[in-house]
Image (cartoon, rainbow, N blue to C red):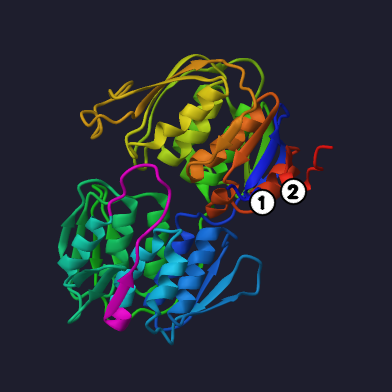
Amino acid sequence: MTDIADVLLVHGGTPLEGEIRVRGAKNLVPKAMVAALLGSGPSRLRNVPDIRDVRVVRGLLQLHGVTVQSGEEPGELVLDPTHVESANVADIDAHAGSSRIPILFCGPLLHRLGHAFIPGLGGCDIGGRPIDFHFDVLRQFGATIEKRADGQYLEAPQRLRGCKIRLPYPSVGSTEQVLLTAVLAEGVTELSNAAVEPEIEDLICVLQKMGAIISMDTDRTIRITGVDKLGGYTHRALPDRLEAASWASAALATEGNIYVRGAQQRSMMTFLNTFRRVGGAFEVDDHGIRFWHPGGPLNAIALETDVHPGFQTDWQQPLVVALTQASGLSIVHETVYESRLGFTSALNQMGAHIQLYRECLGGSACRFGQRNFLHSAVVSGPTKLQGSDLVIPDLRGGFSYLIAALAAQGTSRVHGIDLINRGYENFLEKLEGLGAHIELPSAVPAAS
């Protein structure tokens, strides 16, 4: 039975207008918090959003003896790992079930304690994110891994050693695992075909502030020279470019006008080019970016997701909602997560015309092309969307459903909104501030 507090009524058809603020990136902040485990002294992290992933990592750090306190300014955390200790397995499992980030605790805990325990992992169901590669990497560093009924138990009988690793795909999580493990490993680690997202670069900046020696080459090769000791850091997290793009797509789909304070042009250049091709307008200033629908028809486009500096997969789902309002046929080729287009069935239920295909459409062949995955979409528009009952499937798909409900005529009942708290800070307050007509059913008078 659905928790009534986890349902949102959305009365659509009103443009979103006003200003919201994005803080530190969901894909950086929790990882920077984990990095604090590696230090011999306290770290200070600023621009931290109040999202569930941050609360999960905070709880896990505290279970391992790290003191986490609020700093002097809003959104600041002070993390002191001086007294790191083993945590109770049941407590770890209770905290970690809703997140995949605990896998990144392995390297730091092996360095600090000589052992680590990783329970079963959660996260969004958008396609394969195998953790086996994480364990393979840790074995190459010298860790031993024992599979148990309640998870994986890891040990480092001696100091971990640097090694040469080539990723089969530029995975962000795998790159983070290598970085967090290699910085205190003996010798040099060479990681080729690494992810180079802005959040990866920001994590490298954090580690460098702690005393790490890390270089990035132009061919996606990262070299890490292990050091004997790391200190704390003081760092302001880069803004969340993925959340900023979600609000931009909401402005476009609802024919609105949203100023996203904190959004930065440099990390969003690929998105901004695509936003402009579709027909959206934007204006950059020193404090953020304003996004709006300039009137007139939107343009259908061909779009292919890719690792950075390509079009990010997390930008795809919100923008697809806007593409349902574009004139003509848009082609979307998803090359990062094989199941990420599954959310479109609910859009069709609302009146969109989206057809999924197993072939690689509109671009080059990708690794999903011969594997029977529905990973390409043809979006025919414009179509009028109608309010509907929606069940949120994952973080970005969930926010996309909110955008669709806001753009639709009539009322939608959106189930599972708590999932959006994983990556969108105070999103209900932000929607209300932009003029959205939303309400929680518990606040709705019962029918007589």
Quarter holding the C terminus is top right
Q: Give the residue at x 43% y 61%.
A: 97
Q: Nearer the viewer, residue 28 or 332?
A: 332
Q: Give the residue at x 30% y 56%.
A: 175
Residue 444 within the magenta-colored segment of the rendering: no
Name the residue tied to disc 1: 5
| Direction front: furthest residue | 448
Tell me if residue 312 can be seen: no
Amino acid tagged 2: Ser
The magenta-colored residue range is 111-130
| Direction right: furthest residue | 448
The image position of residue 423, as x and y in percent, is 53, 52
Dot 2: element: helix
Amino acid tagged 1: Ala
Q: Nearer the viewer, residue 222 or 387?
A: 387
In the image: residue 76, left or right of residue 86: right
In the image: residue 349, left or right of residue 228: right
The image position of residue 388, as x and y in percent, is 62, 29
Dot placed on the residue nearer the N-terminal end, 2 or 1:
1
Name the residue tied to disc 2: 442
Kindly indicate the quadrant of the structure image that contains residue 84: bottom left
Figure check: 238 above or below 56: above
